[in-house]
Image: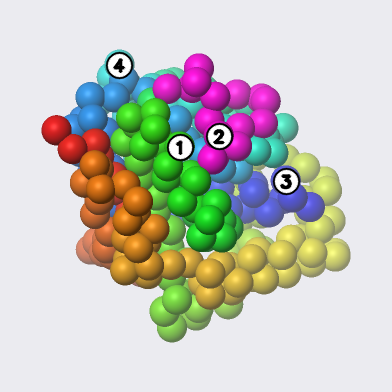
Amino acid sequence: MRLGATDFLEAITSRGDIYRPIQAQIFRAIEDCGAERVVDLCSGGGGPWLSPAWRSVLAEHAPLTVVLTDKFPSSALPGRLVAGVSCVTFPVDAAHVPDGLRGFRTIFSSFHHFPDPVARDVLGDAVRSGEGFAMAEVTTPTLRAFATMMLMPVFAWILTPRMRPFRWSRLLLTYLLPVIPLVVLWDGAVSCFRTRTPEELLALTSDFPHYDWQAGYARGQGTWLASVYLIGRPKR
């Protein structure tokens, strides 16, 4: 069931290119920090780094590479990797990233899972390591986002036949027993309630004044949902 849900989130993130509005700002921050590697936290099924649009920009920034990590690594992720993107198969806690995983840190669609004390620990761990940080989410507490989340079961029914690798269990839990559509509906609705506003995100950074922090909503032409984001760079 978890694989089915993360497979769906990866499919809709990739096919919908939902994080396109924040893409340029994140790559600019990576360049500003002089990073040669991105450490993506809470990667789940892969996130935007595996989408064609992000892979194309990543190739333009070679030799920049990306390593995908998660506290509960997906067994399906190694089969999805592309040029410039790798993953680790051991658990990685976003608030205690191992010293061997150095690089600009990103989190997509997951920061709302952390209560405020843990969210501050996640930011503090990046600051202590001197790494740049960026998070983005599209599950904002807005009517547009809530309306979109209500359509998640429909998207799941449409996208499931196109997901790879093929799994009979995915078909069973989508069409015969619609557990996966219900899970993504519940997850999306709750996430909208839990996702922080830019002001709330900036409030989490008050203990880290030696970083430059930016937060806001990124909107792009042709995109339905705005991305709420937080980006931090060490002050020069």
Q: Position of residue 171 (x, y in %)?
A: 78, 54
What kind of element bears circle 1? helix
Residue at 72%, 32% (x, y): give it: 75
Residue at 34%, 31% (x, y): give it: 131
Residue 3 badge: 3
What kind of element bears circle 4? loop
- The crowding category of the residue bearing disc 4, from other C-alpha atoms within 10 Å (few below 14, some 14 to 19, many at least 20), is few
Q: Position of residue 140 (x, y in %)?
A: 43, 70
Residue stretch in magenta = 88-102
Quarter holding the C terminus is top left
Distance from the alpha carbon under mark 4 to that under mark 3: 31 Å
Hey, what amino acid is under mark 1? Asp
- In this figure, which residue is indicated by the disc labeled 4? 63
- In this figure, which residue is indicated by the disc labeled 2? 96
Is-magenta flag for residue 125?
Answer: no
Q: Residue furthest front?
A: 207
Residue at 64%, 47% (x, y): give it: 7
- In this figure, which residue is indicated by the disc labeled 1? 125
Disc on the earlier residue, 1 or 4: 4
Q: Are marks 2 and 1 in contact (CB under 8 Å)?
A: yes
